[in-house]
Image (tube, rainbow, N blue to C red):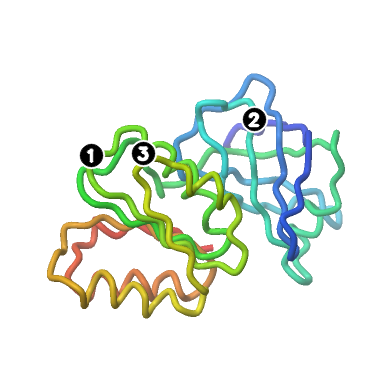
Amino acid sequence: MAEERAAVLEAVRDHGGETRSLFLRVPGGIAFRPGQFISCLLPIGGERLIRPYSIASSPEDGEHLELLIDRVPGGPGSNHLFDLSPGARLDFTGPWGTFLLDRAPEAEAVFVALGTGIAPIRPMLRRAVAGATHPLTLLYATARPIYHDELAALPGLTLDVIAPAAAEDEMRRRWLERDAVRSRHFFVCGVGEIVPRLRDLLRGGGYVRRAVQYERW
């Protein structure tokens, strides 16, 4: 059985549009890798619901975690978390996940964040720019570019914010139709069917399977 840990909610930041960040303190800290998530154990209706949330902060400070959360209409997990106040306890297990980036990619890399899919990609980008020797691009498909100023200031990163509905056409135009290069690496994260659709678009267009990593919520 996975070890259970307890965190304390220290602060909440509203980003507008039913999206907010929860800032947690984990006594003793946890060791995690950029891109991983924790599984929150939520006491709801006499049960403990398990809900995974990607860690939006960097592993260099494992005692403080940031979770980026959308309120899902009728969703018991997200509504429970939205009702928490600073000082509340949050039990969890983890870290988990294989959507990872431990070091700068050894080729040109494109990060595709769909909405709050920016959460695991944010620490990946911080790690990537620290040792990058190849171009890095973030295609941020969102109507509300959270962390925009921070991301725009990352050295060596090209940041492009587009409308969510334009993601598929933009990727096809820029990385399939524009040239014959197929050595790029892709990291794609977001909610729903658009994620496997983008994965299949890239792989079907000539990118090898291992070069297209993805996380779908």
Please state which amino acid type lies under the numbered disc 1. Thr
User: In which image quadrant can residue 9 be found?
Assistant: top right
* Label 3 secondary element: helix
**Could you classify mark 2 by the number of other residues whose Cα lies within 10 Å: few (under 14), some (14-19), or many (20 or more)?**
many
Relative to 205, say whether 94 is above or below: above
Please state which amino acid type lies under the numbered disc 2. His
- Foreground disc of the pair 2, 3: 3
Please report the residue visible at 46 percent of the width from the left and 75 percent of the height from the top: 194
Marks 3 and 1, how far apart in space?
9 Å
Residue sitting nearer the eye, 86 or 98 = 86
User: In which image quadrant can residue 69 be found?
Assistant: bottom right
Q: Which residue is mark 1?
A: 133
Please report the residue visible at 60 percent of the width from the left and 32 percent of the height from the top: 3
Relative to 67, say whether 176 is above or below: below
**Could you classify mark 3 by the number of other residues whose Cα lies within 10 Å: few (under 14), some (14-19), or many (20 or more)?**
some
Please report the residue visible at 50 percent of the width from the left and 48 percent of the height from the top: 120
> Where's residue 197, x and y in %?
38, 76
Q: Which residue is mark 3?
A: 129
Q: Residue furthest top?
A: 28
Q: Earlier in the sequence, mark 1 or mark 2?
A: 2
Q: Earlier in the sequence, mark 2 or mark 3?
A: 2
Q: Which residue is mark 2?
A: 64
CB contact under 8 Å: marks 2 and 3 = no
Residue sitting nearer the eye, 83 or 14 = 14
Residue 22 seen: yes
